[in-house]
Amino acid sequence: MDSQPDDRGSVVRRAAIRLSQILGGLWPFAALLVAWQAWISLGHVSPVVAPSPATVGAYLVDNHGMLLTELKYTIAVAALGLVLGMTLGLILAVAVWSSKVLGGFLIPVVVIVQSFPVVAMVPLIARVMGYDIKTVITIAIIISFFSTFILGRAGLDRHSAGAADVFRVLGATRRSFLWRLALQSAIPNLLIALRLCAANCILATLVGEYLMGTRGLGSLIAVAQSTQQLPLAWAAAVLASGVSIAAFFAASRIEKRGAKRWT
């Protein structure tokens, strides 16, 4: 019976510690809001130039249904691009790992293509894929492909020489070596690629929607700018930034949990 108060006390202490950690992580965003409001107030910035945080917040509340609908669309497109891009990157990484001849051909091509800014490639992609959602998905695929390919290829060789010798002594086939050792060793690198690509895919999708004029938050920003609806543009941008940050932290949490298991 005496242990129950102690148990409640420990739960309360853990909850207080967790709350303090959450609040501690939110202070940069609070500081950003204060700086934003100070810039508007002290600089006497016209609402035509930039709205205040209160104005944007009120717009988010009043129009949350429409904004959330477009946000879901953006997230769905970004998630599809992320999955397809990482899958393609891993497949080509395995192909390069399996064939030195193929690697000698593909790696220079990947390096050359990666050197071009994605935004500069959008007109070419649109010419090939069309001025619609397919181009937006392709942009997200490209963003997630490069990191996955580079990190995945490096991760396939992260296993120790001793482990590779054991597989060879046991007469393991190439396929068994790949599935049971190389891919297992590459998982930490693939989780790093996920962390790097999760937020970038949201932003890349936003850019694609803005340029292509499709649905989503990016399209809302384009429409808001053309019609001088600054609260809408800022609300969509703030919402997209918040989702990108959340995606980064979610992917970082997945990476930490995966690292404990696979490292």
Image (cartoon, rainbow, N blue to C red):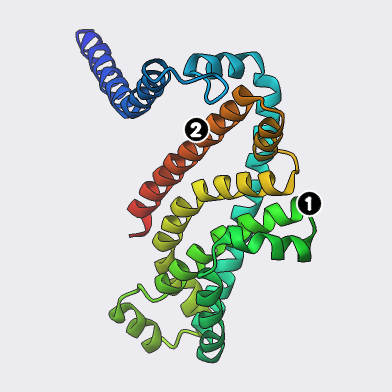
Secondary structure under tag 2 reads helix
In this view, the mark in front (2 or 1): 1
Residue that carries the numbered disc 2 in the rendered image: 242
Q: Point out residue 66 in the picture as x, y percentages from the top left corner.
A: 71, 24
Above/below status of 217 relative to 203 = above
Secondary structure under tag 1 reads loop
* Residue in the foreground of this view, choosing between 74 and 234: 234
User: Residue at horizontal 40%, vertical 45%?
Assistant: 252
Does the CB distance between marks 2 and 1 fall below 8 Å? Answer: no
Res 229 → quadrant: top right
Res 8 → quadrant: top left
Left/right placement of residue 87 relative to residue 223 reads: left
Numbered label attached to residue 132: 1
Outermost residue to the bottom: 101
Q: Point out residue 169 in the picture as x, y percentages from the top left corner.
A: 37, 88
Above/below status of 46 relative to 150 = above
User: Residue at horizontal 50%, vertical 75%?
Assistant: 111
Quarter holding the N terminus?
A: top left
Mark 2: amino acid: Gly
Left/right placement of residue 21 relative to residue 64 reads: left
User: Residue at horizontal 36%, vertical 48%?
Assistant: 256
Marks 2 and 1 sit apart, C-alpha to C-alpha, by: 25 Å
Q: Point out residue 93 in the picture as x, y percentages from the top left corner.
A: 52, 74
Left/right placement of residue 182 relative to residue 113 reads: left
Left/right placement of residue 166 relative to residue 54 reads: left
* Residue in the foreground of this view, choosing between 81 and 212: 212
Above/below status of 244 relative to 172 = above
* Residue in the foreground of this view, choosing between 100 and 43: 43
Numbered label attached to residue 34: none
